[in-house]
Amino acid sequence: MFNRIISLLAACLALAFITAPASAATPTEPLWPTLKYLYFGDKADSIREDATDLLVLEAPKRAEDAAIVPMTIKSLVPQTADKYIKNIHFIIDNNPEPYSANFHLSADLGLVDITTRMRIDQYTYVRVIAEMNDGSLHMVSRFVKASGGCSAPAGKDAAAALARLGKMQIRMRTPTIGEPVTAQVIVSHPNYNGLQYDQETRRYIREHRVTNIAISYNDKPLISVDTGISVSEDPSIRFTFTPTEAGVLKADVKDSKDQHFTQQKEIM
Amino acid sequence: MHRILLSLSALLLSLLITSCNSESNDESNNNYPIKKVTEGIYYHQGVHQDPSEQNIGAVANVGFIIGERCVAVIDSGGSYLEGTYLRQAIKVKTDLPVCYVINTHVHPDHIFGNAAFKEDSPEFVGHEKLPAAMAARQDFFARVFKETLGAAYEGTEFISATRTVSVDKPVTLNLGNRLLTVTAYTTSHTDHDITVLDNKTKTLWTGDLLFMERIPVLDGSLSGWLSTMEQLKTLDLNYVVPGHGTASSDLWQQGFENQIRYFTTLRDEIRVIINDMGTIDEASQQVGITEQNSWELFPQYHRRNVTASFVQLEWE
Ligand SMILES: [Zn+2]
């Protein structure tokens, strides 16, 4: 429900920006002072900024390809049952819909080390806010310059993306039980944000995007991501976890047309 | 005495300047040189820079072919202002009307001059996927390039194709005793590239399927572009006008070879990194180092090419 409200609010805000005549230029007023109340309400003032003792956000200084900007979140404190990061809110201030993803994390994850790929519309602050299991909020942010010239955040080959829709991969090096291993979940999906145009019907294609990616090990959730429209085409989640026993790593993907895609990999 | 001399020389100087100016106005725009490729074919060579207010976005090759009945413009310029310069340049060469404005693909340096030709009521010709590509990008391009190009952007409009060309169904345009063949490709530099062949002189305008000197930019499909290049490099042609860089009768095959080498290097080195669970970040630091001195604007676009290639090669 909370998420519903958030995306609704975000959509309203995005609309306000699109319809405002000043939207042509890059926003000159920083948006965060407004956004934080929109997304965190009463708790906005309690956000601890520059929480560099807890979190690292890695992002390129310049978005090389505006449609695919890799971003990495790392925690510096291990997840334990007593104290762990429950949610990571991912916000890209100057994108049409700033609230870009919410990573729900399990205490079993060990150290958090997650990489995803985003679309970046223009130069912007990117920020992640870690919500601890005690409800406290901790933020780090980075500034990303826009890509130059003709790099639009649009897809390169819509037909190819659509043809592969729903294909999934779980990639990893051969894991050793008890040791951390890096895995990557990718799903082929055009992730239309409702701004793409269909030549055949001469109409805008209705939003068709991935809404959630849930990753579990032996049916215990590791990461579940609610994804917004800033997430790139062919969404990718790369993460580290430690398999403590043999089992099955599984990824489930849901999209806005209520389609489900799944893939799993056995670890022995 | 001093004063008189000074004002006299000032007068002389201003006379000199005005006479130079009026002379150049009659002929052509000195700031906008037009080169002849061969009989009836002319182009303005773009500079190897990123678009800016100073260079009015004139970074791509644009030009025209003159028939007995009318003129075809091939790519209209990187700003409305460049479009007006190109139109002036055509008027210097011929009184015939412009009947076609052909856009090789959606990138701003190739389409932003379209509005300068509106009063000629030409057919705007492009790939069947050009309108979709334009619709998806135009808000973004408008926002970015209004800032990048400043005053040169004023008047720029997004005018889409009124006549489209499908893959495997080349279209012939007749300029009056001069037939042009417009061919559409499957995804290569973009998902909507076309080339224009002048049958009379066997001159091919490649659009951005060929970059000479300047680093090629991938906004389509790595494997698709590689196979399109293999096909184009074997064509029997007298002249080739690339999307960027020098037009020639004898350099273009090497141009294709250079591009093929660049993208093959990227592909092979990225595959190794992907197989080893490496990241986009690692790839953009390690891949293609041997190519860095071979291209203009390498630092601006190479990492972007690596990023775009990486996410495609993950699905091989
Ligand atoms: Zn181009």
Image (cartoon, helix red, strand yellow):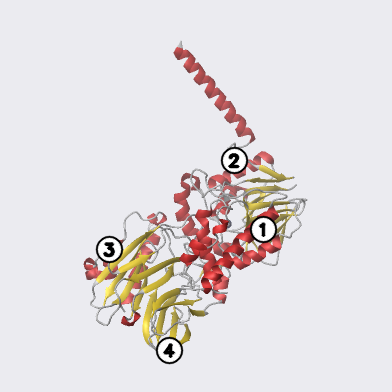
Q: Are marks 2 and 4 in contact (CB under 8 Å)?
A: no
Give the structural element (helix, strand or loop) at label 1: helix
Which label sits in the foreground, 3 or 4? 4
User: What amino acid is found at the position of numbered circle 1 in the picture?
Assistant: Glu
The picture places residue B275, in percent across and down from the top left corner, at 53, 74
User: What amino acid is found at the position of numbered circle 2 in the picture?
Assistant: Tyr
Question: Which of the four quarters of the rendered structure image does ligand 1 lie in?
Answer: bottom right
Q: Are marks 3 and 4 in contact (CB under 8 Å)?
A: no
Q: Residue at x 27, y 61 (%)?
A: A33
What is the distance, in whole Å, between disc 1 and disc 3 at their CAs? 50 Å
Which label sits in the foreground, 1 or 2? 1
State which chain disc 1 sits on: B
Give the structural element (helix, strand or loop) at label 3: loop
Q: Residue at x 37, y 82 (%)?
A: A222
Q: Which residue is mark 3?
A: A50
Which label sits in the foreground, 2 or 4? 4
Q: Which residue is mark 2?
A: B32
Label drawn at residue A247: 4
Task: Decide which of tag 3 and tag 4 comes sooner along the chain.
Answer: 3
Taking A154 as reference, is A186 above or below it?
A: below
Label drawn at residue B257: 1
Q: Are marks 1 and 2 in contact (CB under 8 Å)?
A: no
Which label sits in the foreground, 3 or 2? 3
